[in-house]
C-alpha cells in the first residue's frame, strides 16, 4: 500500500498487486495434469510434473522472498504479526484434521472392518479368514512381518523429542539475544531432523527388502505407509522451514521481539513431533 | 453422444397429462400419477408407511402454523398499509418457548421411529435364508438350504429402450427369473456384491440394503400377500445402474414347495457333462447367449466395446492369441478393473463364451474350446 | 467490469480522506489488474463472476439430465455420459457455483462490515481465487481423456470410482486444488474477522453475516482436509496397491463413505450458513426493525455447526449399520431442527410488526424462508431412519437437497446480489427485472422440484438415465419446469450486466432506508481502498 511509500507506517499492511499467486496456480495446474497423466502411464506425465514443480519452486522463492523483504523492511505492524499468528494456527489445525482422516481410517479398519471380515456372516465369503492385526486381509496371499516398535521407531522417537528440546533452546537464544546459541542449536535441530529422515528411509528399505512389508500389504501396509509417509513428508517440510530460518539467522534477520517466521517454523515442528508420538503409540506400539 | 430418436407416440400423451396436472393441481382425476409410497405388503413396510404419514402430517401442521403467521405479518405489517415498525428485538421467554416446543415434538417423532428400527434390525428366526449377490449388472439368488441358485437378468428388449418398439407394461422392471419366496415366512437375506456397491430394494417390502463387495449384510422381510413385487438397484453402480431390476414372486406355501422341487430337478438336469464333446456350432450358439447376458453390457453385442472404458473383443490380441491366456483371464479377471472373475459360470458356459468370442465378428480362430479344458484350468 | 473510481474525495463519516494518500501504485491496468489484484473488492468480483459462469455450466448439465429424463427410453445421451453429467453437475454446482459465490460475498462485504482495510492476507486471497480456474480446467480436460469424465456421482464412492478411468484422477486432483483454495480462503476470513475489526466492533456487535462466515470458515478448515485425505486414499487404492476400500486386503468400501460424509455433512451447512447470514441482513433492512434475538441467532449457528460433526451417517442408513448406530445418528440429526427452527422463528419475529416493503432482495428472502423450511422438513423426514430406508437414493432426496440448496443457498445469493449490487456497482438494479426474476424462479422452481417428492415416494431411484412407465408424467413436468427455471436465470444475467454497465439509476450511498450497517456509510460504489484508517464504532 502506498501509505508505506509515503513514509507513515500504515494501520495495516496491504501488499501491492502480485504475480506470484497466478504463478503458483500455473504450477498446480501442471502438477495436477502431470500427476494424472503419470499415474496412467502417459509419457507426458513426468515432464509436466517436473515443469510444475520447477514453477512451484520459483514461486515459493519469489513469494517468500517478497514476504521476507517486507518483514525485514519493517512494513508489518503488531496487528499484521497477530494475523500471521492466527493464520499459522489455523493452518496447523487443518493439518491436524488431515492426519485425523488417516488415523480415523486406521481406527476403522482395526476395530470395525477387519473384525467384520472375520465374523460369522463373512464365513460365507471368506471361510478361512480369521480376523487379527496385523493382517493382509482375507484374500491377499503374500505375508509380511510387521514393523517392530522398539528398534528404529523408538530411536526415532527419542530423536524427535530431543529435536523439540534443542529447538526450544535455540528459541531462547533468539529471545535473549544470544545469536551464537541460536545458530548452533538450530543447526542441531535440523541435523536431528535429517537423522530421523535417514533412519526412516533405512526403515522403509528394510521393510521392503527383508520384512516383505509393502504399501500393498493389505490394510496394515496401507495404513502404515500412508501415516508414516505423510508424517515423513511433514518432517521434510519442517526441516526445510528450519533450514530457511537458519539461513536467515546467518544473514542477520530476526530480533528478539520480531521473529514470527522462526516461531511459525517452531510451531510446525512441534506439531510434527506430536503427530509422531501418536504414530509411535498407535501404529508401531499397539500392534 | 447423440442417439437417434425414432418416433415415440407415448410422448404426447404424457405431455397432455403433464399439463393437465400442472393446471388442475391435486384433487382432479389423476389416477395415473403416483403420489405416495407403494402399498406395503410386509409389517415393517406398513410401519414405515404409517411413520411417514405421521411425520408428514406433523410437518404440515407446523408448516401451516409457521407460515400462517408469516403471511399474516406480510399482509398486515407492510408499509403500503401504513404499518409502522415497532423496535423490539429481544425476548428470552419466547426464545425458550420456541426452543423447547420443537424439541418436544421431536421426542414425539423419535419414539415410534425407534420401535420400527428395532423391529427392522431383528433378523432372528428366519424360515428361509437366501444369499443375494449384486453384479454389474444383474442379481443372483442362492437358496442356501435347498442348494440351488440362479441369475436374474433384465428382459426388456433393447428395442424398447431405444424407442424402436412400444414400451411394455413392466418396462425396465422385468427379469427372466424372479426370486421366489413363500408367503407368511420370515425370509432372511444375506446380501453381498461381486464388484461394486449395489443396493437391493423392493419398496413394497420396506427393504433396502446396500450390497457391499467383500462383506455380507443381512436383512429380512415377511410378505403377507402372494403377488409379484418389483424394485430396482438403488446404488449407482456404473452405466447400467438403471437397468438392474429386482422382481420377487411371493407364492403360497404349496406353490413355493412345488417351485423348489422343480428347481432342484432342473439343476440336476442342467448339470452339463463336463466331458461332453460339443459340436462347435452348438457351442457357439450357446456362447452367444452367455455373452448376451454376461458380457455384452460392457463389451457390447457387436464386440466393439466402449472406447476408453471397455476394450473391443473384436480383434483383441487376447481373444486371437493363445487360448490359455483367455481362459486364465476369464477365470481370474483383471484385479482393479471392471473385468472381474467369471469363475462362477459353469465350465460349459465359459467354454461356450470363449469359443463364441474367438469365432465371431472379425475373429476367426476356428478353435473350439471344450469344457474339459476349463475344468483343468480351474485346478 | 465498469471502472471502479479511484478518487478519495468522498470520504465518509468516521474517516476523513487522508491527504498523503495518492495511490501512485494503484492496480495494474487491463487484464493484469484482475490477475494480480490484492484488493478484496476485485477478488470478490472475480469470485462472483466465476460462480455465475459455473452456475450456468452446471445448469446446462442439469438441463441435459432433464432432457434425457423428459420421457422414458434413451434419447439423447449414453448412460455413461449421463452419469458424468450427474456427477459433474453436482461437483460444479457445489464447488464451482455455491461455494465461490459465498466466498465472493465474504470478500466484498466482510471488510466493509467490520471496518477493515482489506482481507488479512490480501496476496493469499488472490491465490485462493486463482486456484479455482486450474481446478475447473482439470475437470474440463477429464471429458476428453480415455474413459471420459468421472461418472460415479459427486460422492465418488469406491469401488465404482476405483474402477473408473483417468477422468477420476483428474477429478481427485481438482478436488485437492479446490480444497487448498477453500482452506486458504477460510483462514483468511477467520483471521480477518478475529484480528481486523475496527475499534469498538466487538464480536457481538458484528453483523450476523460475519458470524455465519466465521463459523463456516471454521467448518471448512476442519473438513476440507478430511476430504483431501479421503480422495488421497482413493488415489493410492487406484494406483499404488493400497486396500483402504477393498475387502480383499482387509479394507472396507464403507470406510470411504464414513470419511466422505464426515466432510460431506458439514459441507452442506457450509453451503447454507452464509446464506443464513445474508437473509439475516436483508430481513431487518426491509422490515425496518433490528434483527430479533441476535444473540440466540449466533448460538443457533454455533449449535448447528457443532451438531453437524456428529450426524454424518444419516447418509448411510442403508449400508447396514447396527441398530445403535442408526439410533444415534437419527437422534443427532433430528436435533438440528431445533437450532434451525430458532433461526426461522427469529426471522419471523423480525418481520413481525415491522414496516415491510417488498423489493427483490426481500422477495427472495421470503422465498428462501418458505422453501428452505420446506426443504428442512423433508430433511427431517429423511432423518427418520425407517422412512429413509424407503427414500434413500431416490428422487425424494434429490427434491430435498434442491429445496435447501437452490431455494435455500441460491435464492439467498440472488437476494444478496440485489441487496448489495447497488453498493458494488453504484447503479440500481432494475426492479421490474428483479421481480420478474423472482416470480419466474419461484414458480418454475416448484414445478421442477416439487414433483420429485412424488417420484421418490413412488420409488424412482436417482442417478438413472431411464425409468419405468409410472414415473413418466412427473418427470415430464419436472423437465418442463427446469427449462423455465433455466430461462428465468437469463433475466438475472441481464439485470446484473445492466448494473455492471452502469445502465440504470445512480445508487445513493444508502439505497435502503432500513440499512444500518457500516457498508451503507460508504459511497456507492465504495472507493478502491476503504477504511485505511479504521472507523470507530460506538
Ligand atoms: C444446503 C444444504 C443442506 C441443508 C441445509 C440440509 C439440511 C438437512 N438435511 Fe440434508 N442433504 C443435503 C443438503 C442439505 N441438507 C444434500 C446435498 C443431500 C444429499 C447428498 C447426496 O446424497 O448427494 C442431503 C441429504 C440428506 C439426508 C440423506 C438422505 C439419503 O440419502 O438417504 C438426510 C437424512 O437425514 C438429510 C437430513 C437433513 C436435515 C435433518 C437437515 C436439517 O438441517 C433441516 C433443519 C430445518 C428444519 C427442520 C426446518 C425449520 C425448522 C423449524 C420451522 C422448527 C420446527 C420444526 C420441527 C420441530 C420439525 N439430508
Ligand atoms: C447447489 C447446487 C445445485 C444447484 C444450483 C442445482 C440446480 C439444478 N439441478 Fe441439481 N444437483 C445437485 C446440486 C445442485 N443442482 C447435486 C449435488 C446433485 C447430486 C449429484 C449426484 O447425484 O452425484 C444434483 C442432481 C440433480 C439431479 C439428479 C440427477 C440424477 O440423479 O441423475 C437433477 C435432475 O433433475 C438435477 C436438476 C437440477 C436442475 C434442473 C437445476 C436448476 O436449478 C439449474 C438451473 C440453471 C440453469 C438451467 C442454467 C442457467 C440458464 C442457462 C444456461 C440459459 C440457457 C437455458 C435455457 C435455454 C433453458 N440435479
Ligand atoms: Cu446395481 Cu445400481
Ligand atoms: Cu447430511
Image (spheres, rainbow, N blue to C red):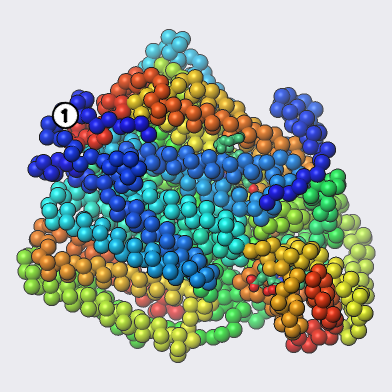
Residue furthest front in the image: C30
Q: Position of residue B243 (x, y in %)?
A: 75, 55
- Judging by the rendered image, the residue that carries numbered circle 1 is C17
Residue C283 shows up from this direction: no
Residue furthest left in the image: A177
Q: Chain of mark 1?
A: C
In the image, what residue occupies the spot 73% across and 24% down?
Answer: B24
Residue furthest top in the image: B82
Q: Nearer the viewer, residue A282 or A138?
A: A138
> To which quarter of the image does residue C326 belong?
bottom right
Q: Secondary structure at mark 1?
A: loop
The mark tally for this picture is 1
> Which quarter of the rendered image does ligand 1 occupy?
top right
Q: Position of residue B92 (x, y in %)?
A: 37, 30
Residue C482 shows up from this direction: yes
Instruction: Say above or below: C6 vs B232.
Output: above
Q: Is residue A140 left or right of residue B231?
A: left
Q: Position of residue C505 (x, y in %)?
A: 38, 19
Q: Position of residue C353 (x, y in %)?
A: 42, 18
Q: Is residue B248 left or right of residue C283?
A: right
Q: Residues within 10 Å of mark 1 (few under 14, many from 20)?
A: some
Q: Is residue C35 left or right of residue C81?
A: left
Instruction: Say above or below: C120 vs C201.
Output: below
Q: Is residue C487 left or right of residue C73?
A: left
In the image, what residue occupies the spot 41% across and 71% down?
Answer: A227
Q: Quadrant of the N terminus of chain C?
A: top left
In the image, what residue occupies the spot 47% across and 32% down?
Answer: C414
Instruction: Say above or below: B53 vs A105.
Output: above
Q: Nearer the viewer, residue C68 or B37?
A: C68
In the image, what residue occupies the spot 42% across and 63% down?
Answer: A31
Q: Quadrant of the C terminus of chain C?
A: top left
Q: Is mark 1 within 8 Å of ligand 2?
A: no
Amino acid at each position: 500500500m502506498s501509505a508505506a511509500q509515503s513514509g507513515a507506517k500504515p494501520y495495516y499492511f496491504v501488499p501491492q498487486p502480485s504475480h506470484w499467486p497466478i504463478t503458483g496456480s500455473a504450477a498446480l495446474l501442471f502438477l495436477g495434469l502431470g500427476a494424472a497423466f503419470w499415474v496412467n502411464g502417459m509419457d507426458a506425465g513426468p515432464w509436466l510434473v517436473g515443469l510444475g514443480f520447477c514453477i512451484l519452486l520459483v514461486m515459493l522463492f519469489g513469494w517468500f522472498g517478497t514476504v521476507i523483504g517486507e518483514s525485514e523492511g519493517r512494513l508489518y505492524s503488531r496487528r499484521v504479526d497477530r494475523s500471521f499468528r492466527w493464520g499459522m494456527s489455523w493452518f496447523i489445525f487443518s493439518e491436524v484434521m488431515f492426519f485425523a482422516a488417516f488415523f480415523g481410517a486406521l481406527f476403522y479398519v482395526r476395530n470395525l472392518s477387519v473384525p467384520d471380515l472375520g465374523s460369522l456372516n463373512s464365513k460365507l465369503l471368506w471361510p478361512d479368514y480369521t480376523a487379527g492385526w496385523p493382517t493382509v486381509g482375507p484374500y491377499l496371499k503374500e505375508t509380511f512381518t510387521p514393523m517392530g516398535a522398539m528398534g528404529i521407531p523408538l530411536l526415532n522417537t527419542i530423536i524427535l523429542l530431543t529435536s523439540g528440546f534443542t529447538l526450544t533452546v535455540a528459541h531462547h537464544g533468539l529471545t535473549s539475544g544470544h545469536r551464537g546459541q541460536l545458530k548452533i542449536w538450530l543447526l542441531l535441530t535440523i541435523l536431528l531432523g535429517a537423522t530421523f529422515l535417514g533412519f526412516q528411509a533405512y526403515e522403509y528399505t528394510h521393510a521392503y527388502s527383508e520384512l516383505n512389508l509393502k504399501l500393498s500389504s493389505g490394510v496394515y501396509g496401507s495404513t502404515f505407509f500412508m501415516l508414516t509417509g505423510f508424517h515423513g513428508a511433514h518432517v521434510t517440510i519442517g526441516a526445510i522451514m528450519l533450514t530457511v530460518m537458519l539461513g536467515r539467522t546467518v544473514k542477520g534477520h530476526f530480533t528478539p521481539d520480531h521473529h514470527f517466521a522462526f516461531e511459525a517454523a517452531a510451531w510446525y515442528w512441534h506439531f510434527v513431533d506430536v503427530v509422531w508420538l501418536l504414530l509411535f503409540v498407535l501404529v508401531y506400539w499397539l500392534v | 453422444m447423440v442417439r437417434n430418436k425414432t418416433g415415440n407416440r407415448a410422448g404426447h400423451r404424457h405431455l397432455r397429462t403433464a399439463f393437465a396436472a400442472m393446471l388442475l393441481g391435486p384433487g382432479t382425476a389423476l389416477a395415473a400419477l403416483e403420489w405416495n409410497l407403494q402399498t406395503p405388503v410386509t409389517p415393517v413396510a406398513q410401519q414405515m408407511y404409517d411413520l411417514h404419514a405421521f411425520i408428514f402430517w406433523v410437518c404440515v401442521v407446523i408448516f401451516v402454523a409457521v407460515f400462517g403467521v408469516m403471511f399474516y405479518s406480510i399482509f398486515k405489517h407492510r408499509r403500503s398499509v401504513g404499518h409502522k415498525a415497532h423496535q423490539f428485538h429481544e425476548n428470552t421467554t419466547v426464545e425458550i418457548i420456541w426452543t423447547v416446543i420443537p424439541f418436544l415434538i421431536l421426542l414425539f417423532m423419535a419414539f415410534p421411529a425407534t420401535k420400527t428400527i428395532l423391529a427392522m434390525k431383528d433378523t432372528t428366526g428366519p424360515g428361509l435364508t437366501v444369499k443375494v449377490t449384486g453384479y454389474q449388472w444383474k442379481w443372483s439368488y442362492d437358496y442356501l438350504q435347498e442348494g440351488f441358485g440362479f441369475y436374474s437378468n433384465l428382459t426388456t428388449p433393447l428395442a424398447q429402450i431405444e424407442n424402436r418398439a412400444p414400451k411394455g407394461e413392466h418396462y425396465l422392471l422385468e427379469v427372466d427369473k424372479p426370486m421366489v419366496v413363500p408367503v407368511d415366512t420370515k425370509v432372511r437375506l444375506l446380501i453381498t456384491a461381486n464388484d461394486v456397491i449395489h443396493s437391493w430394494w423392493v419398496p413394497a417390502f420396506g427393504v433396502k440394503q446396500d450390497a457391499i463387495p467383500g462383506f455380507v449384510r443381512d436383512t429380512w422381510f415377511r410378505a403377507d400377500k402372494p403377488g409379484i413385487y418389483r424394485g430396482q438397484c438403488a446404488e449407482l453402480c456404473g452405466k447400467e445402474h438403471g437397468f438392474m431390476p429386482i422382481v420377487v414372486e411371493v407364492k403360497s406355501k404349496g406353490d413355493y414347495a412345488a417351485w423348489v422341487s422343480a428347481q432342484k430337478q432342473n439343476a440336476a438336469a442342467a448339470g452339463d457333462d463336463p466331458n461332453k464333446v460339443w459340436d462347435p456350432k452348438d457351442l457357439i450358439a450357446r456362447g452367444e447367449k452367455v455373452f448376451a447376458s454376461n458380457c455384452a453390457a460392457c463389451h457390447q453385442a457387436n464386440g466393439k466395446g466402449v472406447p476408453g472404458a471397455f476394450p473391443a473383443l473384436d480383434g483383441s490380441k487376447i481373444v486371437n492369441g493363445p487360448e490359455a491366456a483367455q481362459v486364465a483371464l476369464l477365470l481370474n479377471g483383471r484385479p482393479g478393473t471392471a473385468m472381474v472373475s467369471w469363475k462362477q459360470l459353469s465350465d460349459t458356459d465359459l467354454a461356450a463364451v470363449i469359443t463364441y468370442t474367438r469365432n465371431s465378428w472379425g475373429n476367426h480362430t476356428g478353435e473350439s474350446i471344450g469344457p474339459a479344458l476349463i475344468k483343468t484350468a480351474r485346478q | 467490469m465498469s471502472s471502479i473510481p479511484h478518487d478519495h474525495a468522498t470520504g465518509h463519516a468516521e474517516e476523513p480522506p487522508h491527504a498523503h494518500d495518492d495511490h501512485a501504485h494503484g492496480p495494474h491496468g487491463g487484464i493484469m489488474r484482475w490477475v494480480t489484484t490484492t484488493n478484496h473488492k476485485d477478488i470478490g468480483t472475480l469470485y462472483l463472476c466465476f460462480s455465475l459462469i459455473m452456475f450456468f455450466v452446471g445448469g446446462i448439465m442439469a438441463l441435459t439430465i432433464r432432457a434425457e429424463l423428459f420421457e422414458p427410453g434413451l434419447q439423447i445421451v449414453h448412460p455413461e455420459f449421463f452419469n458424468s453429467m450427474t456427477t459433474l453437475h453436482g461437483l460444479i454446482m457445489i464447488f464451482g457455483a455455491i461455494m465461490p459465490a459465498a466466498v465472493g460475498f465474504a470478500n466484498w462485504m466482510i471488510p466493509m462490515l467490520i471496518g477493515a482495510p482489506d482481507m488479512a492476507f490480501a496476496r493469499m486471497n488472490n491465490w485462493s481465487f486463482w486456484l479455482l480456474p486450474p481446478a475447473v480446467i482439470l475437470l474440463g480436460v477429464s471429458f476428453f481423456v480415455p474413459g471420459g469424465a468421472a461418472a460415479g456421482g459427486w460422492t465418488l464412492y469406491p469401488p465404482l470410482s476405483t474402477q473408473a478411468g483417468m477422468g477420476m484422477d483428474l477429478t481427485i486432483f481438482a478436488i485437492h486444488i479446490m480444497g487448498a483454495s477453500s482452506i486458504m480462503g477460510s483462514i483468511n476470513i477467520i483471521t480477518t474477522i478475529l484480528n481486523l475489526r475496527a475499534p469498538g466492533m466487538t464480536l457481538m456487535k458484528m453483523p450476523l453475516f460475519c458470524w455465519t462466515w466465521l463459523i463456516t470458515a471454521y467448518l471448512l478448515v476442519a473438513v476440507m482436509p478430511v476430504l483431501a485425505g479421503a480422495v488421497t486414499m482413493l488415489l493410492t487404492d487406484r494406483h499404488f496397491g493400497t486396500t483402504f476400500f477393498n475387502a480383499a486386503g482387509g479394507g472396507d468400501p464403507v470406510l470411504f463413505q464414513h470419511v466422505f460424509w464426515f466432510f460431506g455433512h458439514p459441507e452442506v451447512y457450509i453451503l447454507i450458513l452464509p446464506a443464513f447470514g445474508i437473509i439475516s441482513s436483508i430481513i431487518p433492512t426491509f422490515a425496518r426493525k433490528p434483527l430479533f434475538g441476535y444473540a440466540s441467532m449466533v448460538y443457533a449457528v454455533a449449535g448447528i455447526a457443532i451438531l453437524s460433526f456428529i450426524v454424518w451417517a444419516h447418509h448411510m442408513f442403508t449400508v447396514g449399520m447396527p441398530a445403535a448406530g442408526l439410533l444415534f445418528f437419527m437422534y443427532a440429526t433430528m436435533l438440528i431442527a431445533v437450532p434451525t427452527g430458532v433461526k426461522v422463528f427469529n426471522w419471523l419475529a423480525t418481520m413481525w410488526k415491522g414496516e415491510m416493503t417488498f423489493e427483490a432482495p426481500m422477495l427472495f428472502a421470503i422465498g428462501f424462508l418458505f422453501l428452505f423450511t420446506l426443504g428442512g422438513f423433508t430433511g427431517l423426514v429423511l432423518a427418520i431412519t425407517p422412512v429413509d430406508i424407503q427414500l434413500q437414493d431416490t428422487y425424494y432426496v434429490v427434491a430435498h437437497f434442491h429445496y435447501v440448496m437452490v431455494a435455500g443457498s441460491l435464492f439467498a445469493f440472488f437476494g444478496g446480489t440485489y441487496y448489495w449490487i447497488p453498493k458494488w456497482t453504484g447503479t440500481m438494479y432494475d426492479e421490474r427485472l428483479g421481480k420478474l426474476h423472482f416470480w419466474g424462479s419461484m414458480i418454475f422452481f416448484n414445478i421442477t422440484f416439487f414433483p420429485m417428492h412424488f417420484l421418490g415416494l413412488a420409488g424412482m431411484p436417482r442417478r438413472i438415465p431411464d425409468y419405468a412407465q409410472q414415473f413418466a408424467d412427473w418427470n415430464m413436468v419436472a423437465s418442463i419446469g427446469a427449462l423455465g427455471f433455466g430461462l428465468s436465470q437469463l433475466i438475472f444475467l441481464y439485470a446484473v450486466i445492466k448494473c455492471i454497465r452502469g445502465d440504470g439509476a445512480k445508487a445513493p450511498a444508502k439505497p435502503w432506508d432500513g440499512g444500518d450497517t457500516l457498508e451503507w456509510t460508504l459511497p456507492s460504489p465504495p472507493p478502491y481502498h476503504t477504511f485505511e484508517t479504521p472507523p470507530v464504532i460506538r
